[in-house]
Each structure stands twice: as structure tokens, then as C-alpha cells.
Image: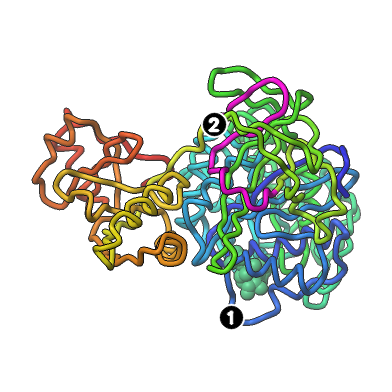
């Protein structure tokens, strides 16, 4: 599968239950990787997507890992990078967005834009990642299509430019009007979504009598949208000003082929990325890649550490010796995997846009660059607004040395953010995370890897703002706020709630209090 066909590398951003697992499987189904849906969304008791994918891989033998799913569609290679959600939601979820060229924002037609979607969207906006919007579950009663367009415009400030428009309201899904061709794409229900839904296209003249009324209503709204400047424009889409929208039912496999076509036709291909010093690395240059996610085996017996990297330029060949930019040391990729294959050894090459996994990569950290030839170092992956805070202390004070070393290591790896202040001292730093699962990882690794079990205790803070040394002085002793420092020197003011953060900023305009990426 791995060859130099054109690539599309994207992620799905959504709130839990919007249908990410369902659409992921439907995408693979349409790409003819697998032949029947049902393994993932058929089972009860939903688990995190990571394990869903692993179940899918086991059940069907398709090419899936915990980091990316790769398949072929219309002679393109598509890399769908996983955004861990549910209980796995963590700083990693944001970081993986640094590895994609576009995002699909999946919206539940009945619920509109939900908090996790908004957070992930903000990261896309920050990184200039173009977003395609899919309104899902149109087979179920939900909000009106025009109302959803208003919500998008108000809440994420992108102008929605629907490419398809629903014929029939949510819950009465007759099909969509393809706004580019004027055709009616008829929705055909398949039993439980179990087979690949055929796409029935017809011209406006051939719309069946039974659908005539709803078709006329759709045509009218379509014309209104055009008058309102809501037609797709490639330039504003790529610039992050507009978002193409389409309507789907992932469960019924409707709209999924349309989405794949959109990704190929509109979403950007891998392209040049600038290094920290501004030097561009073009896709045709020598091999380079950056690490966007590091995963440690939770099993104490094997200290396996997998570093996932996104290829920026050149061709990767297994066994290649690359240079690790931050240390200048050579790094042998004998154990590198093209993560998308079950038969890892059979895959020897990977190309820009692909995700590769380095096994046993103790030296590689999130944000690190590896390259061949002309040196390059890509900008660091930013840190995001933490929302959970805990103090950590060594359970056995006799093991303080191990404690300090472990915390320092986990801080450097970006497992959690470690915050300190004179007030709290070195004995009990504050750990800050985007998702609570990050604390579990810390606890496990401190016990098994650094031989220093820890005690964690919750702090009643939820919101972080960036401040400076003056801000730290001014806020000292304030109610519901504390200022701590990250190891990179950044001061964070942490507040008990949004309201207090807002009020403090309003009452003290002279104090620097900036929101952090993805923060509220
Ligand atoms: P995730 O949490 O985003 O991965 O969501 P899932 O894919 O697990 O879907 C959550 C629930 O919504 C499951 O019960 C799905 O069967 C259901 N679902 C997903 N897509 C659709 C859809 O298009 N229509 C309907 N009616 N249900 C859907």
C-alpha cells in the first residue's frame, strides 16, 4: 500500500458520541479496505476510540494502529490520524492536530457544536488547518439546517459554505442537493448500514414525485445561501475563513463517499513546512519528520516507548540512519515501523504525510525533529491550556531523588506540565493536564519506571492564563488564584473558575492575563 501516490492526511474533530468511530469505519468501508460495517458501532458499552480501532484491526485485519489509519481511495493514499477522545482526551489529542493538513469537524445534527469540538476547532484555527464540516445523524430528528449554519458562523466565526444541502429535514432524510451540480443525490437506506450504500444521482428533472415538495424547499434554501455569499470558495477555505459543509448519516453510510471525494478534491496535500529559523523544508527535499506523540507501554515489564512522527519531506526507508536534531546524534531506524501495517516488516517506505512509529525510541520527545541531509529543526509543538491540576509528592520521602528525576523526565516528555512556585517548594510540584488520564500515566510510570510511587491530591483550579513576573507579584495572595512557573519559564496564573479569571482580568487591566491555546 505504501507508495508515492498523492497523500491526504487529516483528523476528525468531534465531541464524544457525534459518530467519529462510526464514520471512521464507514470511510474505510468506502475505501474498500473492509467489506462490512458493524464491528465498532454494533457493540454495546462504548470504549475509547483507540481501543475501538484495535478491535477493528483484530476483527477485520485492516491496517490500523492507535495512531493512524491508512487506506487507498481513488488512487490517493489517505492517512486518518486518530484524535483520542472520551476518557483518553488529553494534551495528545491537541498535539496530533500538528500532524495533519486538514480536519473534518463532525457535528451531531441534534446537538450542534459541543465543547470538545470547539476546543479542538480552536487548535485547528491556531495552526491554520482548514476545516471541512460534516453534519452527521441527519437520519434522526435534529436542528434545522439553516439554524446549524447560524451556529457555526456564531460559534466558530467561519462562514459555512455548504456543498450539499439536505432534502428533507433532520429525521426525514430523502437525500441531498449537490450544490455544485444541481443534482439530487438520493438517500438509500441499507439494512443496518451493513453494506456499502449505492449513490443514486439524478438531475433535478428526475426527482421523484414523492420528494417534490421537500426538493423544492431545498432548492429555495440553496438559492438563499447563494444570495448570502455561502458558496464554496477554495481560497477562503484554505485561508481558514470559510468551511465547506456537507450532510451525512455515518451510520447509514450516506455522505461518506462524498466526504472522501471532498478530501481529495479540496483538502490540501502535504506541503512545505518551515523550520524554527524560517528555512523551508519542501516535500521533495531530503527526509525529515517531527514527533507529535510519544506513547509508553503501560506494562512495566517492557519499557517500550513508541514515538509517532509525521513525515514532512523525502522518502523514508526502514533502516535509514537519521539525525536527531536536538542532540545532533544519529538515530538508527532499524526498529522503525510504518505503523499502518500489521505486517510491519513488509512495509519499507513511507512518504510525506505518512505517520511512522519509532519503536524503543527512548531519546525522542514530542516536538523533536529527525532528518537526513541538510539539517532542519521544526518548531516545537505548543503546550495547551491545562484544565486539571494536582499536587504530587513522593510517597516515600527516602526516594526523593528518584521522585525528582522522574518528574523532570515526564515534564520534558510532555506527559504533563510541571508547575512550581517558591511557596510550594520542590517537594510538591503541581502537575497540570488537559485530561485526567495524563495523571494516571504519571502515577504508573513513577511507580514502575522511576521507583518512586507518588501521592496525588486534587487542586481546586480549572483555568490557566499566561502571565509574567509582574503579574505573578500582583496576583500573589489573591483569592481563587495562584501563580506558578513552568520549567520553560512561562508564568501561569491558575484560577478556580472562568468567572474569576474573567473578573481578575477586567479589574486589573494592567496585569498580563492571556488565554493559552485551546483554553476557554
Ligand atoms: P464517537 O463517540 O464519536 O466515536 O461516536 P460513535 O461512532 O461511537 O457513535 C455514537 C452513537 O451514535 C452510536 O450509537 C452510533 O451508532 C450512533 N451514530 C453514529 N452516527 C450516526 C448516524 O449517522 N445516525 C444515527 N442515527 N446514529 C449514529
Horizontally, is 199 left or right of 324 in the view? Answer: right
* Label 1 CB-ligand 1 distance < 8 A: no
Q: Is residue 17 magenta?
A: no
Spot occupied by residue 511 in the image (x, y as percentages of width and height) = 18, 31
- The answer to whether one can see residue 120 in this image is yes
The residue located at (26%, 52%) in the rendering is 429
- The answer to whether one can see residue 264 in this image is no
Spot occupied by residue 421 in the image (x, y as percentages of width and height) = 20, 44
**Label 2: which secondary element:** loop
How packed mark 2 is, by other alpha carbons closer than 10 Å (few <14, some 14-19, many 20 or more), is some
Of pointers 2 and 1, the one earlier in the residue sequence: 1
**Looking at the image, which residue sits at the far bottom?**
44
Q: Which residue is mark 2?
A: 326
Q: Taking 138 as reference, is 512 above or below it? A: above
Q: Quadrant of residue 288?
A: top right
Q: Is residue 364 magenta?
A: yes
- Ligand 1 located in image quadrant: bottom right
Horizontally, is 141 left or right of 318 in the view? Answer: left
Q: Main secondary structure of the magenta part?
A: loop
Report the disc number at residue 45.
1
Report the disc number at residue 519.
none
Spot occupied by residue 382 in the image (x, y as percentages of width and height) = 47, 38
Spot occupied by residue 344 in the image (x, y as percentages of width and height) = 81, 56
Amino acid at each position: 500500500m505504501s507508495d508515492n501516490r498523492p497523500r491526504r492526511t487529516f483528523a476528525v474533530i468531534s465531541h464524544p458520541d457525534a459518530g467519529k468511530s462510526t464514520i471512521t469505519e464507514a470511510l474505510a468501508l468506502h475505501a474498500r479496505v473492509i467489506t462490512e460495517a458493524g464491528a465498532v458501532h454494533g457493540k454495546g458499552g462504548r470504549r475509547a476510540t483507540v481501543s475501538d480501532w484495535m478491535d477493528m484491526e483484530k476483527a477485520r485485519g485492516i491496517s490500523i494502529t492507535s495512531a493512524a489509519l491508512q487506506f487507498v481511495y481513488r488512487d490517493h493514499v489517505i492517512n486518518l490520524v486518530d484524535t483520542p477522545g472520551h476518557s483518553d482526551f488529553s494534551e495528545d489529542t491537541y498535539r496530533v492536530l500538528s500532524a495533519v493538513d486538514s480536519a473534518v469537524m463532525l457535528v451531531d445534527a441534534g446537538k450542534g457544536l459541543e465543547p470538545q469540538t470547539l476546543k479542538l476547532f480552536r487548535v485547528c484555527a491556531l495552526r491554520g488547518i482548514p476545516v471541512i464540516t460534516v453534519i452527521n445523524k441527519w437520519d434522526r430528528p435534529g436542528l434545522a439546517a439553516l439554524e446549524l449554519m447560524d451556529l457555526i458562523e456564531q460559534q466558530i466565526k467561519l462562514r459555512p459554505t455548504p456543498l450539499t444541502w439536505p432534502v428533507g429535514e433532520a429525521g426525514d432524510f430523502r437525500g441531498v442537493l449537490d450544490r455544485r451540480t444541481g443534482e439530487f443525490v438520493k438517500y438509500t437506506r441499507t439494512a443496518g448500514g451493513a453494506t456499502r450504500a449505492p449513490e443514486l444521482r439524478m438531475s433535478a428533472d428526475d426527482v421523484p414525485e414523492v420528494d417534490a415538495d421537500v426538493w423544492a424547499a431545498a432548492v429555495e434554501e440553496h438559492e438563499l445561501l447563494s444570495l448570502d455569499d455561502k458558496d464554496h470558495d477554495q481560497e477562503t477555505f484554505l485561508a481558514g475563513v470559510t468551511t465547506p459543509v456537507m450532510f451525512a448519516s455515518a451510520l447509514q453510510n450516506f455522505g461518506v463517499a462524498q466526504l472522501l471525494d471532498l478530501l481529495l478534491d479540496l483538502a490540501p496535500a502535504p506541503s512545505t513546512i518551515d523550520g524554527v529559523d524560517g528555512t523551508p523544508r519542501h516535500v521533495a527535499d531530503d527526509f525529515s519528520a517531527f514527533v507529535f506523540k510519544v506513547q509508553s507501554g503501560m506494562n512495566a515489564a517492557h519499557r517500550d516507548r513508541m514515538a509517532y512522527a509525521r513525515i514532512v519531506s523525502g522518502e523514508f526507508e526502514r533502516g535509514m540512519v537519521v539525525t536527531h536534531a536536538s542532540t545532533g546524534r544519529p538515530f538508527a531506524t532499524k526498529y522503525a515501523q510504518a505503523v499502518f501495517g500489521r505486517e510491519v516488516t513488509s512495509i519499507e517506505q513511507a512518504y510525506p504525510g505518512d505517520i511512522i512509529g519509532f519503536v524503543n525510541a527512548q531519546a525522542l520527545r514530542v516536538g523533536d525533529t529527525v532528518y537526513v541531509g541538510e539539517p532542519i529543526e521544526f518548531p516545537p509543538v505548543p503546550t495547551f491550556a491545562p484544565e486539571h491540576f494536582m499536587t504530587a509528592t513522593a510517597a516515600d520521602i527516602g526516594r526523593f531523588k528518584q521522585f525528582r528525576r522522574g518528574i523532570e523526565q515526564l515534564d520534558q516528555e510532555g506527559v504533563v506540565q510541571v508547575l512550581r512556585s517558591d511557596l510550594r517548594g520542590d517537594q510538591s510540584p503541581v502537575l497540570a493536564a488537559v485530561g485526567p488520564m495524563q495523571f494516571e500515566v504519571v502515577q504508573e510510570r513513577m511507580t514502575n519506571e522511576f521507583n518512586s510511587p507518588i501521592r496525588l491530591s486534587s487542586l481546586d483550579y480549572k483555568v490557566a492564563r499566561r502571565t509574567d513576573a509582574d503579574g505573578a507579584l500582583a496576583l500573589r495572595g489573591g483569592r481563587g488564584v495562584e501563580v506558578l512557573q513552568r520549567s520553560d519559564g512561562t508564568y501561569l496564573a491558575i484560577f478556580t473558575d472562568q468567572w474569576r479569571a474573567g473578573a481578575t482580568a477586567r479589574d486589573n487591566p494592567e496585569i498580563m492575563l492571556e488565554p493559552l491555546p485551546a483554553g476557554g
